[in-house]
Amino acid sequence: MKRMLSFIITVLVLTGVMVFTTPGLLDKVRLGLDLKGGFEILYHAEPMEAGAELSRASLQKTAESLEKRANALGTSEPEVTTEGTDRIRLKIAGVTDEAEVRKKMKEPAVLTFRSAAPGDAVGTYSKIELVGSDFVEGAADVQRDKLNRPEISIKVKDKSKFAEITKRLIGQKLVIYLDDRKLSDPNVNMEISDGSASISGNYTLDKARELADTINLGALPLKLTEKYSQSVGATLGKQSLDQTVKAGLVGSVIILIFMIGMYRLPGALASFALILHTWLLIAVFVIADFTLTLPGIAAFILGIGMAVDANIITNERIREEMRSGKSILSSVKAGNKTSFRTVMDANVTTIIVAAVMFAFGTGAVKGFALILIVEIVLSIVTNLYFAHWLLTVLVKAGALKKPKQFGVKESDIRAL
């Protein structure tokens, strides 16, 4: 009785949770360009100055700058990632003026130090005193002052120019901008003639490091060249999503009908585990903020297929044990045991392949591999353990007493 009660409570609670949370989860799933519409660009990055070195840090900071630019333009959740040693991939959905956004994106990140010009409104700084190329490359660093507070040390190439600027602006602000975004507004306290200065203030260590990295980036701005681009209209993206969802629903219904018709009650339990598997995957998408794309849906469908295969292998092994004349409980235990290694071997080898794809692939290949890995892990939890547990509980509770409940005919059972 206790086993049956635990089975009923487990199924009812999980069903209730899935029914009430699924609509909200689906609304929060982040859609990729191929499902929502937008554009994707792969940039090749190179230093503006001939012979300069392209560092990993400068590539990463340029990617961060692109993301901030895209956010400033009001675009919807841009994705900016670095690839290899000299490439940046940009994905932006929901763009109305693609040409304008692309123009803004490819401009080099411009670092400027500005002062207030005559006629500027209060809080406005339009006169450019220094640009990124005026600073010594990689010289900006974070140090500690006498009170152990973070400060940023900088060096300029032209000491006399810096001395003239700092002398003229004593008691005024020399405001730091990246593009048109204000980063910091330090005061000039004295004339600096040796070309080295410190920027201090109420900085946290992380903020100080971020500002130092930005100044180093400004000293070595990168030129971006489009190597690949792809645009997807909003209508086409919606059509792709609608067709994919429709095909997925039809395929899922066919699979559930097949499992129940072929394996009776154990097939129904396997179908419930597949539904739980799907719900968990959607929850992972939302919690981890994954982006759902067509390649991701392909990985999702492949994972579902592998989960169905696992259930079919297990149920067939159980039926083979029953046909040999074993009891139902012994058949379930033996079938689960003999199928476990086969299913796990298939899952582990697929995870290894997906891991290799993730390590060496780029863009959509990485997304496909990552979702496939998550799929397989969830499949192991839901279909290899949870479905087996449900079936064992029902058998021990006496709810499954006859071979025909497993789709096995009495005439097929061989006497021991």
Image (cartoon, helix red, strand yellow):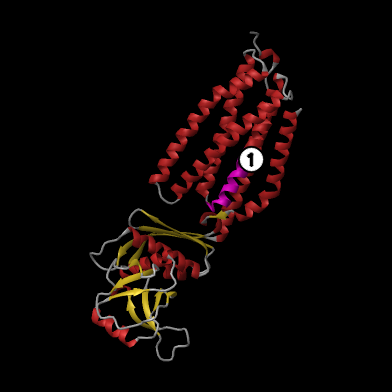
* Residue 286 among those drawn in magenta: yes
Residue at horizontal 36 percent and vertical 65 percent from the top: 213
The image shows residue 402, relative to residue 56, as above or below, that is above
Image quarter of residue 392: top right
**Camera sees residue 44:** no
Give whichever of 195, 251 is nearer the camera: 195
**Camera sees residue 382:** yes
Residue bounds of the magenta highlight: 274-291
Q: State which quarter of the image contains the C terminus.
A: top right
The image shows residue 360, relative to residue 239, as above or below, that is above
* Residue 210 among those drawn in magenta: no
Q: State which quarter of the image contains the N terminus.
A: top right
Q: Which residue is mark 1?
A: 276
Q: Is residue 201 left or right of residue 376?
A: left
Q: Crowdedness of circle 1 by 10 Å Cα count: few (<14), some, many (20+)?
A: many
Amino acid type at image mark 1: Leu
Residue at horizontal 69 percent and vertical 17 percent from the top: 409
Q: Please, what secondary structure does the residue beneath circle 1 have?
A: helix
**Residue positioned most to the front:** 147
The image shows residue 244, relative to residue 409, as above or below, that is below
Residue 25 percent across, percent down from the top left: 63, 52
Looking at the rendered structure, the number of numbered marks drawn on it comes to: 1
The image shows residue 2, relative to residue 28, as above or below, that is above
Image quarter of residue 157: bottom left
**Residue positioned most to the right:** 1
Give whichever of 201, 230 is nearer the camera: 201
